[in-house]
Amino acid sequence: MDITLNALPVSETRVSRPAALIFWLMGVACLVFAMVVVGGITRLTESGLSITEWKPIAGTLPPLNEASWLSEFEKYKQIPEYTQINGPAGMTLAEFKFIYFWEWVHRLLGRVIGLAFALPLAWFWVKQAIPAGYKPRLLALLALGALQGTIGWWMVSSGLSARTDVSHYRLAVHLLTALCILGGLVWTALDLKELKTNPDARPATISTFTAIILAILFIQILFGAWVAGLNAGYVSNTWPLMNDRVFPDGVDTANGAFYALVNDPYLTHFVHRWWAWVAVFALVVLSRRVKKAGVRAASTAIHSAFGVQILLGIATVMTGVNIVLAVSHQAVGALVVASTVWGAHVLGRKPA
């Protein structure tokens, strides 16, 4: 299998300005990384349901006076998270402002990313600075970013009526889409970097081998998102055993093994904990091939990212999900994705 992301007519790439586009795309990638970090803080502080309406334009500004804050607080008081959890706990307006802040920052950053991508794209388009064949890919990334905003609200809406939190399925879609956008930005920037070096360079492709590596990593991130959504990190604070057992006691299979696999916090935690080593093995193999291909920096980046990620994962479990370690775990997870994409790109490069 050989998947070519774009076929570029060589003769049309010589009038492009790949250097400027590389700087732009990597800048947006950094913003997406920041979005993943803020998203982790929002989730861990239980802030995601604090804004109960989706107002893409009007919601840009936070409440600016006491009356507006009280109005937002009253809206929050109508949802199950408040009536069943925070209300009985005696949540104050000051505490509501804290969780509102993180959700507002998360949404604001999403708007900033949209503008940071769309406005320069329009400028490069008008200036005819986009290499031939790259316009469809950039439009696809723009569309995926717009879809991510819709997915974000789709996720939040799942926790506004019958639930006290968001659906872990929808949370996983939201996180995976963000990381897919990050990977697409990095891959496209790397293609443009090759084009900058050699105007006759062809886009890299995804081989069967790298597709398998990416699939293994996808499964690990998927279970990580489910662990987050189910608060499964709290079911055990010991490692390598889970509460003194290799296979955890407490898995509920009353609705079947598959249902437990995707819904039971003990089982999702178990799979995320041990599939990590499958991912490590795959990434070691990838990094060795990347090193043989002559790009030692990419190989080092892959090793460093997954090494730190494993240590952070263990530390997060053993500290009972310390928020700093948990957010760092999510942040480095994004770096694992970026470094893996770099390695896959190295192996997928084609001769001019």
Image (tube, rainbow, N blue to C red):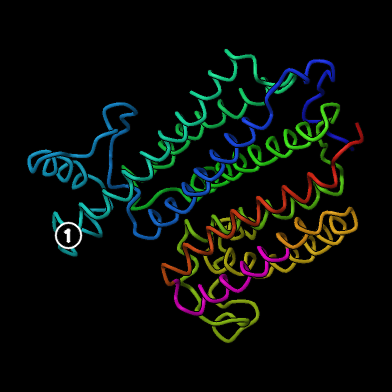
Q: In this rendering, is residue 37 above or below 310?
A: above
User: Magenta region: which residues?
Assistant: 303-321
Q: Quadrant of residue 161?
A: top left
Q: Quadrant of residue 149?
A: top left
Residue lying furthest bottom: 244
Residue at image position (48%, 31%) is: 116
Local packing at callout 1 (Cα closer than 10 Å; few below 14, some 14-19, many 20+) is few
Q: Position of residue 123 (x, y in %)?
A: 53, 19
Between 167 and 128, the one lying in front of the other is 128
Q: Disc 1 residue type? A: Met
What residue sits right under mark 1 in the picture?
91
Residue at image position (77%, 20%) is: 13
User: Does the magenta run of residues contain 314?
Assistant: yes
Q: Secondary structure at mark 1?
A: loop
Magenta highlight: main SS: helix
Between 267 and 19, the one lying in front of the other is 19
Q: Which of the image's four quarters has the C terminus?
A: top right
Residue lying furthest left: 67
Task: Please indicate whether residue 28 sits to the left or right of residue 130 in the image.
Answer: left
Residue at image position (46%, 78%) is: 319
Between 245 and 49, the one lying in front of the other is 49
Q: Position of residue 150 (x, y in %)?
A: 45, 31
Task: Please indicate whether residue 32 sits to the left or right of residue 3 in the image.
Answer: left
Q: Position of residue 221 (x, y in %)?
A: 62, 55
Between 30 and 89, the one lying in front of the other is 30
